[in-house]
Image (cartoon, rainbow, N blue to C red):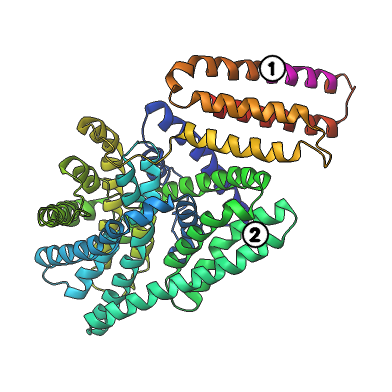
Amino acid sequence: MHPVEVFELTLVVLIAILGLHWLALRLKLPPAVALLVGGGALAFVPGLPVFELDPELVLVLFLPPLLMDGAYFTAHAEFRKHIAGVLSLAIGAVVFTTLVIGVVTHWLMPELPWAACFALGAIVSPPDAVSARAVLQTVRLPRRLSTLLEGESLLNDATGLVLFRFAVAAALTGTFSAGAAAGQFLFLAIGGIVVGAVISGVWMLVLSRLNDEHLIIAASVLMCWAAYIGAEAVHVSGVIATVTAGLLLGWFQHTIFSGRVRVRATAFWKVMVFIFEAFIFILIGLSLRGVLERVGGIDVVLQQMAVPVLVIVSAMTVARFAWVFGSDAVLVILRGLGLRKARPLGVKAATVLGWAGMRGVVTLAVALTLPDAIPGRDFMLVTAFAVILVTVVLQGTTLGALIQLLGLVDHEPPPKLTSSQAEASMMEAQRKAVEERAYDDGGQLIHPQLLERYTRRSTIAARYVGHEEAHKDAINAHFNVILAAVAAGRTELMRLHRSGDIDDETLQSLEHDLDIQEIAALDGLV
C-alpha cells in the first residue's frame, strides 16, 4: 500500500474505534468485544487489502506503554502483599497450562512432535495484560482478586515467551534441557529487573532536572520503550524491565512530578493508552482474514481444525480452573496445619479467577513469529486466534454477570484510615503549615484570611469524620453551588471574549482557573 493509503486506512480505523466503543457503551458490552468483532467484520469489507500484523513491531510498539500503564497505577502495598499469589499465577499457572495443552495437542495430533505441541501451549497459556485491563475496567472486583489478575497479567508474558522460545528451539533442533530453560528464565527475569531499575533511575534523575512540563511528559512516555528495548538489546526480559520501571516511576512520581505535570501527564497518558488498547483489538480482528487465507480458507478450518481447536480451548480453560482450585486447596491445607498467613480465596473468588483468563495480542503476535519450518504452524495460528476470540468474547461478556451472580464480598481488611480520616489529617497538616507562616517575626498576624480559611477547612474535615452519610446531601449541595458559580463565571468570561473586551491570553488563563475549580468540585461530589 502507498504510505498515503496507509494513513487513510489508519484514520478509518480510528473512526471505527470511536464508533465501536460508543456502541459497546450503549449495549453495555466490554469495548474489547465490540472492537474485536468489529475488526473481524471490517477485515472482509470488499476492496480492503489483506491486513497482516508484523509481530515484532506489534510487541515493541504496543506492549511497553500498556505494561507501563498497568505497573504505574499498581497499588504497591497490595501487590507486595499478594506477590506469592501473583507469581503462582504468572509462573505456575502458565507452566502448568503449557504442559496440559502440550499433552492434549499430542493426544489429538500424534504426528506433531512434542516440542511443537508445547510451543502451542506456550502461545496460548499466558492471559494477556491488555485483554485483562480492557475487561476488568468494566467490572468491580474485591481488592485481592483485582491485584492477582492485574499482577498476573503484568508478569506472565515473560514466562510464556521463555517457554515459547525453548519449545520452538527444541522443535527445530530436537534437543531440550529443563535445567537450561529454568536457568535462562532466572537470568532473563533478574536481568530484566536490573535493567528496568537502572533505566528508571537514570530516567527519573533526568526528569527531575527538566524544567519544562512538556519535556517532562514527553520524556516520561518514552521511558517505557527505553526500558523494553534496552532490556531486549542485552537479551533479558523486556517485559519485566518495563514492569519494574513502571512500578518505580509510580512509586516516586509523587516526589518528582509537580501537580500540574501529574494532571496533564495523566490525561495525556490515559488518552494514549485508550487508543493503543483499542487499536490492538481492532487490529487482531483485521488480521482474521489474513490468518484464514494463510491456512486455506474457512472451509479448511471448519472441516479439519474445528474439533481439535475446540478441545484445546476447553483444555486450556479447565487447566486454569484446575490450577486455581488446586492452589486454593493447598492454602486450605496449610491453614488447617496452623499457617495463619495462608488465606484461601474460597469457591466464589476462585471461580471468578479461573474464568478471568482472557488472551490477546501477545498470543497472536507470538503465534505469527512461528518459523515456517515448524510442524503444525497453520493449526497453531488458527488455535491462537480461536483462543483470543473465545476468551475475549465469551469470558469478557459474561465475567460481569458471573461476579454479580456470585455476590463477591471484599474480605480484605480495610486500611487503617478511611478517606475522610486521611483528608482530616492532611488538612490539619496544612493548617499547621499556614499557622507557622501566618505571623511575622514580631508576632503580628499578616495572613489572617489564609489562616481563617485553612482553620475552617480543618475544622469541617474533622467534624465530617464518622458522619459521612449525615453530611452527604449538604456536601453535594455545596459542590453544586460551586459548579453553578463556575458555569456563571464561564458564561461571563465567554461574553467578555466574544465582545472583544479581553484577549485570548486572558481567556485561557482565567478559563484554566475555572477548569481547576470545576474538576475539584466534581471530584468532591459524593
Q: Which badge, 2 or 1, is on the more N-terminal residue?
A: 2
Task: Name which residue type carries label 1.
Answer: Ala
| The residue positioned farthest toward the right in the image shown | 501
Specify the quadrant of the image occupied by residue 375.
Answer: bottom left
Rendered location of residue 71, percent (x, y): 46, 55
Does the magenta stretch mainly form a helix, a strand or a loop?
Answer: helix
Q: Nearer the viewer, residue 308 or 483?
A: 483
**Magenta span of residues:** 485-496
Quarter holding the N terminus is: bottom right
Q: Are marks 2 and 1 in contact (CB under 8 Å)?
A: no
Rendered location of residue 86, percent (x, y): 30, 57
- Distance of label 2 from label 1 (alpha carbons): 38 Å
Of tags 2 and 1, the one toward the viewer is 1
Label 1, on which residue?
Answer: 485
Q: Nearer the viewer, residue 83 or 490?
A: 83
Local crowd size for mark 1, using a 10 Å CA cut-off: few (<14), some (14–19), many (≥20): some
> Above or below — where is 281 with respect to 100?
above
> Above or below — where is 160 with respect to 314?
below
Residue 262 is left or right of residue 294, and the answer is right
Mark yes or no: residue 287 visible. Answer: no
Under tag 2, what secondary structure? helix
Rendered location of residue 172, percent (x, y): 27, 81
| The residue positioned farthest toward the front in the image shown | 442
At 50% from the left and 67% from the top, the residue drawn is: 228
Q: Is residue 270 rendered magenta in the image?
A: no
